[in-house]
Image (spheres, grey):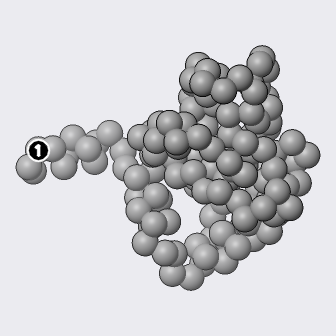
Amino acid sequence: MKIAFTTSDRVHINAHFGWARQIDVYEVSDEGYSFVETLNFEGDLKEDGNEDKITPKLEAIGDCTIIYVVAIGGSAAARLIKKGVTPIKARSEEEEIAEILTKLVQTLKGNPPPWLRKALKQKNTTFEDVVENEATV
């Protein structure tokens, strides 16, 4: 699964979702994790109430299962959830990306909590699964 982090230094989860100029994306499994890419965003990102600024971010991280943020607005969080991306607030701006990734790998090796199993199931559903489920209803 892909996990995204809003960051200004590529070490800590220290950026507000709407204001983030960088989002780092990692691939995570029970075997470990690897860096995929840094997504970069330009423009006036600090303007509150400008919902257009988050649209490119929503599209860019649409294939992620989770995004870790230091803060996020309610409408942005709702739009992420609607796309099947679970936003999670970091405990502080000092929380390190590597620490979260290591914990996620350990969690996936064991018994993931219900919210994570649900998030994983949503991302692993294919178009064929949806069609099949609709046919049985």
- Looking at the image, residue 89 sits to the left or right of residue 63; the answer is right
Q: Please name the amino acid that badge 1 sits on.
A: Ala
Q: Image height check: is 41 above or below 4?
A: above
Measuring from the top left, give residue 122's x and y in whole percent: 40, 52
Which quadrant would residue 30 be assigned to in this image? Answer: bottom right
- Looking at the image, residue 67 sits to the left or right of residue 35; the answer is left
Tag 1: Cα neighbours inside 10 Å, few (<14), some, or many (≥20)? few
Q: Residue furthest left?
A: 137
The residue lying toward the viewer, choosing from 126 and 116, is 116
Please indicate, yes or no, whether residue 58 appears anywhere in the rendered image: yes
The residue lying toward the viewer, choosing from 66 and 49, is 49
Identify the image quadrant of the N terminus.
Answer: bottom right
Q: Image height check: is 1 above or below 109?
A: above
Measuring from the top left, give residue 62's x and y in whole percent: 54, 37
Q: Image height check: is 5 above or below 52?
A: below
The residue lying toward the viewer, choosing from 7 and 118, is 7
Q: Residue at x 68, y 48 (%)?
A: 71
Which quadrant would residue 33 be assigned to in this image? Answer: bottom right
Q: Image height check: is 86 above or below 54?
A: below
Which quadrant would residue 106 be assigned to in this image? Answer: bottom right
Measuring from the top left, give residue 15's x and y in whole percent: 78, 44
Q: Residue at x 9, y 50 (%)?
A: 136
SS class of the residue under badge 1?
helix
Please indicate, yes or no, whether residue 63 appears anywhere in the rendered image: no
In this rendering, the count of numbered labels is: 1
Q: Residue at x 68, y 34 (%)?
A: 18
- Looking at the image, residue 83 sits to the left or right of residue 104; the answer is left
Measuring from the top left, give residue 114's x and y in whole percent: 43, 72
The residue that disc 1 covers is 135
Q: Residue at x 21, y 41 (%)?
A: 131
